[in-house]
Amino acid sequence: MNVFGVTGWKNAGKTGLMERLVAEITARGFTVSTVKHAHHAFDVDQKGRDSYRHRAAGAHEVMLASGKRVAQMTELRETPEPKLAELLARLSPVDLVLIEGYKREAHPKIEAFRQEAGHALIAPGDPSIRAVAADVSLDLDRPVFDLDDTVAIADFILREVGLLATHAPEATGLRPPPLKNDCFALPPGVNWTPVDEALAELKERLRVVVGQEEVPLADAAGRVLAEDLVAKRSNPPLPNTAVDGYGFSGGVPEGEAQFPLIDGRAAAGIPYQGRVPEGAAIRVLTGAALPDGVDTVVLEEDCAIGADQIAFHGPIKQGANTRKAGEDVAEGEVALPKGRVLTPADLALASAIGFGVLNVFQPLRVGVLSTGDELVEPGESAGPGQIFDANRPMLLSAIARFGYEAVDLGRVKDDRDGLRAQLDAAAERVDVILTSGGASAGDEDHVSALLRESGALAEWRIALKPGRPLALGVWNGVPVFGLPGNPVAAFVCTLIFARPSLSKMAGSGWVEPLGFDLPAAFSKRKKPGRREFLRARMRNGRAEVFKSEGSGRVSGLSWAEGLVELGDEGHEIVEGDLVRFYPYGSFGL
Ligand SMILES: Nc1nc2c(c(=O)[nH]1)N[C@H]1C(S)=C(S)[C@@H](COP(=O)(O)OP(=O)(O)OC[C@H]3O[C@@H](n4cnc5c(N)ncnc54)[C@H](O)[C@@H]3O)O[C@H]1N2
Ligand code: MOO
């Protein structure tokens, strides 16, 4: 049963909060029960009443019933107070049990807090307190709600116990709270952030931003498991035969062997009901559950088969040609971990262990927006100073390849109000926004300016080529990756920074590309202090790089089949030296 507590000191507003929560949550269509811990000698009965007299006379339990309600009182007398778990077990099933008091029990709770009551907060020393409902603002490592904001508190509790996903009227699913504004803030004083440091910051600060939903198994390929998949059933469920042949009990020594055949057979899905006597054999077909009295099978090709007996040459080991129950997966075993991106083979496994529906994360919706006065749509007519939007189709298709829902947010001019309106609208529709252009600090770099204005920008100047200016911010709770405008820089930043970040936000955890070392087919001198990615491809076992490193040269991205990474330190690469190559496929493309 889902359980959530309301705790707090005396006069902190617990009972009022309980009352409002019960009203709010039942109004949303859930059934709610409550448990309250009271002081020692509480009594709901009154002296002189019939029920009181029954008790006083020594009854163990007194049940009082009418057409409207039933009350059951248990006199504990000398027996110890029942534990909370025992009390919960007595309640009829409901969607949620709210518990008032029971501070020391480990169930998740919200703490009610009123400043004027004059007590210290319990939350800092008690991890079971998941949030605080207070009449003042507090600086805490947990969510703090206004004590009177019953709607938000109810949302929080329902989300915590997993009820928002299935019952929310909008059916938007279980949605975690938005990311905090400061989630991309860089430590003060940092100017050029090394790539690894930037990645470590993102890995540390980002978390899952999507809700959960249930989907039929057949539609689950590519989706992200939202919980460990625990085998409901062993695979195989019963010991069975791996071949078509004849089953009997025990091993057979070297030499000729004969077994009388009994009537009947065992086939997959059609078990043999009786017991096979010791010394006799029975016809079995691949996949059939082993009948009682059978633990070994001889292949039919190895047998001479008569009307009522078989003969073959031993030896045959006991257990030969059979599969043990659960030899593949045992019931209760975690077959696939939470966060797994489901493959076709995983669907076979999930089905084999008893699942028809899977609890997955809702798809991450990633919006892509291009910025720049100079941009026109691909294929349209372009003036002399105009260029075709190359980034948007590239980024949208990369997002789709990563397995997310790519949302085309179009183009926006270098105009702050227009961009603001676009971001506002986008934040309603998507979980993450990727913009390109306007990320550095020029007069027309409105993305960084706006994010700065919203107070949630970290302009990361990354020690990276290409892709130096990366503006990270949070717009109305939605993370924004302000990618550089140059297509090569936008692409590299997407693969190196956005991809693992998106994976973490989508529930599939931080991912790292798998590269390998190849002898260079080029030579190059590189200064220390920043990492470089070169457009590259593998030919004849060596890494070739594109003839130019220009960050606007789209043709090189297309020519390449991957990236060569040159580390932060200085390099003097000559042909034949090993360099690290990452095929595009290792980035999920
Ligand atoms: N004074 C400085 N100038 C620049 C710096 C710097 O540090 N100081 N950094 C340079 C680097 S490195 C890059 S990368 C770019 C990134 O600048 P922005 O993100 O502000 O991008 P824009 O200026 O808007 O555009 C740069 C370039 O890319 C073209 N572009 C933009 N969007 C698209 C698109 N959707 N499709 C195709 N091409 C696009 C745009 O026309 C520009 O040519 O800043 C350098 N400058
Ligand atoms: O990021 Mo810029 O493209 O390094 O040239």
Image (cartoon, rainbow, N blue to C red):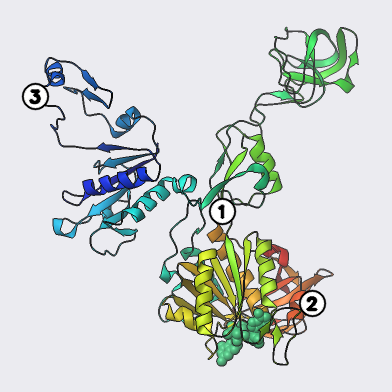
Q: Which residue is mark 3?
A: 47
Q: Which mark is residue 212?
A: none
Can the viewer see residue 257? yes
Determine whether 563 is above or below 524 in the image.
Answer: above
Q: How far is the residue under mark 2 from the one under mark 3?
A: 97 Å
Q: Residue placed at 22% from the left, 37% from the top?
A: 37
Q: Amino acid at mark 1?
A: Gln
Q: Secondary structure at mark 1?
A: loop
Instruction: Name the residue that disc number 1 marks.
Output: 362
Mark before the other along the chain sequence, 2 or 3: 3
On the picture, is 23 further left or further right than 118? right
Q: Write down the residue under mark 2.
A: 521
- Image quarter of residue 115: bottom left
Quadrant of the rendering where the C terminus is positioned: bottom right
Q: Are marks 3 and 1 in contact (CB under 8 Å)?
A: no
> What's under tag 2, amino acid-wise?
Ala
Mark toward the viewer: 2 or 1: 1
Q: Measured from the top left, where is residue 238 in percent x and y? A: 66, 24
What amino acid is at disc 3? Answer: Lys
| Quadrant of the image containing the N terminus | top left
Residue under the image location 58 percent in, 35 percent down: 231
Q: Above or below — where is 420 with respect to 208?
A: below
